[in-house]
């Protein structure tokens, strides 16, 4: 079973940004979980442009989120030993590491590249079709919705040379 994960973040600054939401699901788009993350006391970065994209206000994190150490524990319990596919590459890795370092926990799962997974499991021509459709498709910029989008595209394109 493949698993897909996405983060939303305070900004795209790879020095100061931090995760504000995480969501994941399996390849059927099921067993999904999503959490808003209360920022660690040292996390102060906030970008209005990023907020206009994901529509999450910093205040929402405090009103509806849970502490990052709890999110990290939940992630380890739910995803332990699994290969998690992400489409954000170094960004998802950075935000996950920032979360786990702040929580003082070791991560019990590892990331794999989403695009590499799809490319490996379909023909070259199908992969070209996938890339065209993926880049033209709408992205919600909410963590669980985006993880489910990854699962949906993966399921439609894997081992399918007739797309």
Image (cartoon, helix red, strand yellow):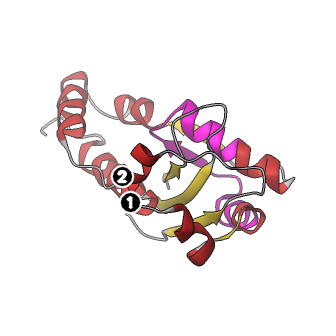
Callout 2: few (<14), some (14-19), or many (20+) C-alpha neighbours within 10 Å? few
Would you name the residue on which mark 2 appears?
A: 52
- In the depicted structure, whether residue 5 falls above or below residue 15: below
- x, y percent for residue 105: 84, 53
Q: Give the range drawn in magenta.
A: 73-97
Badge 1 density bin: few <14, some 14–19, many ≥20, Cα 10 Å: some
Q: Are marks 2 and 1 in contact (CB under 8 Å)?
A: yes
At x 42%, y 69%, the residue is 30
How far apart are the alpha carbons under marks 2 and 1?
5 Å
Image location (x, y in percent) of residue 67: 72, 68
Q: In this view, does 142 lie above or below 132?
A: below
* Direction from residue 97 to residue 118 in the image, left or right: left
Q: Is residue 121 in view from this perspective?
A: yes
The spot of residue 107 in percent (x, y) is 76, 49
Label 1, on which residue?
A: 55
Q: Answer whether residue 53 is magenta in the image.
A: no
Point 57% across, 33% down: residue: 13
Q: Is residue 156 above or below residue 112?
A: below
Instruction: Point out the residue furthest to the bottom here.
Output: 63
Asked where in the image residue 124 lies, by quadrant, the reply is top left
Q: In this view, does 24 lie above or below 115?
A: below
Camera-side residue of 136 and 109: 136
SS category of the residue bearing label 2: helix
- The quarter of the picture where residue 133 lies is top left
Nearer the observer, 101 or 132: 101
Question: Horizontal and vertical percent for residue 54?
Answer: 39, 55
Q: Quadrant of the C terminus?
A: top left
Q: What element carries label 1?
A: loop
Residue at 18% in and 24% down: 125
Disc tally is 2
């Amino acid at each position: 079973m493949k698993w897909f994960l996405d983060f939303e973040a305070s900004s795209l600054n790879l020095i100061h940004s931090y995760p504000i939401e995480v969501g994941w699901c399996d390849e059927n788009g099921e067993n999904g979980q999503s959490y808003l993350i209360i920022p660690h006391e040292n996390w102060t970065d906030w970008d209005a442009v990023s907020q206009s994209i994901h529509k999450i206000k910093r205040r929402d994190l405090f009103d509806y989120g849970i502490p990052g150490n709890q999110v990290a524990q939940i992630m380890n319990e739910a995803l332990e030993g699994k290969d998690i596919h992400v489409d954000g590459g170094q960004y998802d890795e950075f935000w996950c590491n920032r979360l786990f370092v702040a929580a003082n926990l070791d991560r019990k799962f590892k990331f794999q590249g989403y695009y590499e997974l799809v490319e490996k499991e379909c023909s070259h021509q199908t992969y070209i079709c996938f890339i065209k459709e993926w880049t033209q498709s709408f992205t919600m910029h909410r963590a669980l919705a985006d993880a489910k989008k990854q699962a949906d595209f993966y399921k439609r394109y894997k081992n399918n040379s007739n797309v």
